[in-house]
Amino acid sequence: MQRIHPARLIRRAVLVAGLLFVVLSSAPAREALVMGVFPRYGLRGTVEHFTPLADYLSRRLEQPVELRSAPNFVLFQQELERGAYDILHVNQYHYVRAHQRLGYEVIAMNEEGGRATIAGALVVRRDSGITSVSQLRGRRIVFGGGVRAMQSYIITTWLLREAGLGEGDYVQEFARSPVNAIFAAYFGQADAAGVGEPNLQKRIVTRRIDTAELRVLARGPALAHLPWAVRRDLPAALRRRIRTLLVNLQETAQGRAVLEAAELTALRPATDADYDPHRRIIAQVLGVAY
């Protein structure tokens, strides 16, 4: 058997290592996907909730996924309008607008507490003496988010209109988020709050207040939950892969941990037609057809 001199072995190892370095360094780095999540829990809370999901997708896609949110809905919408997000988690209004104007396609929707539907709600203190929506005439109502907040403003305004209250029949104010609107009603800074009903069960709320002291004065229809969408110009195979990863999260222990961090029980498949009822209410309240 021929013996190879140690010096030659070293030279061969160096040559192989050098070739491997050339191959690896010449391979193009995969561009990061940007996952935009609207500030449902404020900026800090939203980042805490959804960073595990961004990390999970990064590992499974073998491609960096960068999580971005914003301090408020207006700034988030501005970034959305300039096409900053590849993967998008928004309220239903933002989605139908982004679908029409920017070409986003829904792939999944939230399931929270075992339900894939959500309702907007007007919330008051139990000791307020307010028992009907008509009694909010002349009262101060704080809406969570802004005029594009689907559950917190659009649905709850629709409830007010159904009860015969028009613009100017009550004092309209806005909180930075639905959570802050709930706190405003609880601490007596407003007579009512307009929110998405599931926010009453969120940890950020139940850790601070006794929600038993609040009651739902009126709730809107059960509608398809908050959507997840992707840019239409992403490669079709990548869009399908992202969808598969999202809707199968509950199938593994790692995926369930990601869902728990986001206060979700699952992500369910969704289609654009699931959001047609939202479009009809948006047209009635805002006078805009999407």
Image (cartoon, rainbow, N blue to C red):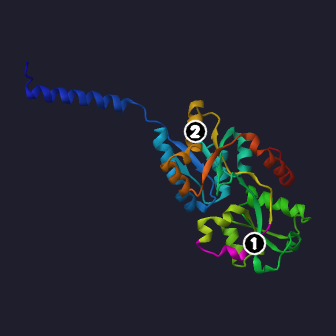
Q: Which residue carries the number 1 mark?
A: 215
Residue at position x 86%, y 69% from top? Answer: 133
Near-viewer residue (180 or 249): 249
* Element type at mark 2: helix
Q: Which residue carries the number 2 mark?
A: 244
Q: Which residues are magenta?
A: 207-217
Residue 91 disc label = none
Q: Is residue 242 above or below residue 165?
A: above
Q: Is residue 101 above or below residue 2?
A: below
Q: Reading the chain from its start, which is encountered first: label 2 or label 1?
A: 1
Q: In the rendered view, does 140 fall on the left or right side of 244?
A: right
Residue sitting farthest toward the right: 164
Q: Is residue 212 magenta?
A: yes
Residue sitting farthest toward the top: 1
Query: How far across and down, in percent of the image, does residue 230 sit?
Result: 63, 40
Q: Amino acid at mark 1?
A: Arg
Residue at position x 73%, y 63% from top? Answer: 195
Q: Count all numbered tags in the image, as a single digit.
A: 2
Which image quadrant is residue 40 in? bottom right
Query: How far across and down, in percent of the image, does residue 199 sit?
Result: 67, 63
Q: In the rendered view, does 147 fall on the left or right side of 239?
A: right
Residue 177 seen in the current view: no
